[in-house]
Image (cartoon, rainbow, N blue to C red):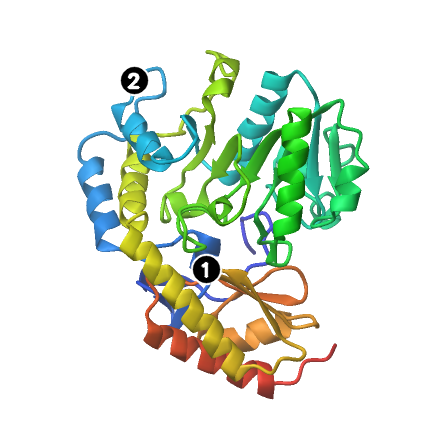
Amino acid sequence: MSSLFPNYARRPIHLVEGKGTIVTDSNGKSYLDFISGIAVNNLGHAHPTLTQALEQQSRKLWHVSNLFESPEQEALAATLMQDTHLSHMFFCNSGAEANEAAMKLARKYTGKHTIITFKQSFHGRTFGAMAATGQDKVKHGFGPLLPSFLTIPFNDPESLAEVEMDDVAAIMLEVIQGEGGVNEITPGFAKAIDDVCKEHGILLIVDEVQTGIGRTGTRFAYEKTVLKPDILTLAKGLGGGFPIGAMAGTSDLAAAFSPGTHGTTFGGNPLAVCVAQAVVQHIFNPLFLEEVKEKSAYLRKRLQQILPDSPFVIKGSGLLIGIECGVDVIPWIEELQEKGLLVVQAGETVIRLLPPLTVSRQEIDKATDILGSVLTEVPVVS
């Protein structure tokens, strides 16, 4: 009998070692990891740059609390916000924490309460982030949630136009809804949101917990749109596997987070910041990002060659790729795992591919061969 709460539907394998894109379980079986800790291990497993950075920092300082100045936090913030319109940053431990900070900042700065979010979105499982999430399955059983969230259809300019904006503090969105089905924002809807925010003085919060830090082939996914967030949230790939989250904002917002308004014990600790700095410096290299785009194009081409147009639809951006299958994908995911490929679902009918950004073409070939053999040959009951 397990001593752990059963809040995870755990897979019956114990992974004990990883190198690059390959992970090995306790029985010695190897797998291609196209989950990457759910878009966390952007540089793969045991990347030498990150292991060296962590080892060196571990010999110097682990934790001192945010009561003291941190030039290392300042340096990481500067690296993340270089050549952007953002100017201030807060470090925490996770994506949910970053989104909680963003919602607090928006309400504190504007003095308003309503935050617009979108159906099929996912922003975390804390009470505020859960209330913001546009998926009922996340909310069942917890009673009344935090008020003042208005959830409307995604990519629907007409629904947005019908909202009364007088008490709206912010619009909060994912440029690509990862958990919700790998749903990309359309150019028209992005323009509509941009127009509404400018017209009504509404803050824009862009949740890049899953899409940030090179995942889409750019530093941040919003850079592929007309959107210019007032607040940006990050986590997952930022630490390359070491827990860290962040919230960035414009200079206008800085005064709203005065001493005592928000805080964290462990956020931005020396170990996390050191590893994140190494991650960002590596991934934000323009040549590295160009390689991500090339690998994305190659992966999509391979999928299009292997899978028929119907019922399969390829969607997503960079190395966040969804395969819409039209049926429950759990049986296929189990079969893919049996054949040595780890993937994750996005909603009930979408297989989500999240390989490390360092994945090789040979590994893409092997993964797509497995996908083709399973998705076209193994029957699934709809």
Q: Residue at horizontal 31%, vertical 26%? A: 74
Question: Label 2, on which residue?
Answer: 69
The kind of secondary structure element at disc 2 is loop
Q: Residue at horizontal 53%, vertical 78%? A: 304
Q: Quadrant of the C terminus?
A: bottom right
Question: Label 1, on which residue?
Answer: 318
Above or below, 56 relative to 73: below
Real-space Cα distance between discs 2 and 1? Answer: 37 Å
The kind of secondary structure element at disc 1 is loop
Q: Nearer the viewer, residue 379 or 213?
A: 213
Residue type at the position of mark 1: Gly
Are there few (<14), some (14-19), or many (20+) residues within 10 Å of tag 2? Answer: few
Residue type at the position of mark 2: Glu
- Residue 326 tag number: none
Above or below, 268 relative to 325: above
Q: Is residue 248 left or right of residue 361?
A: right
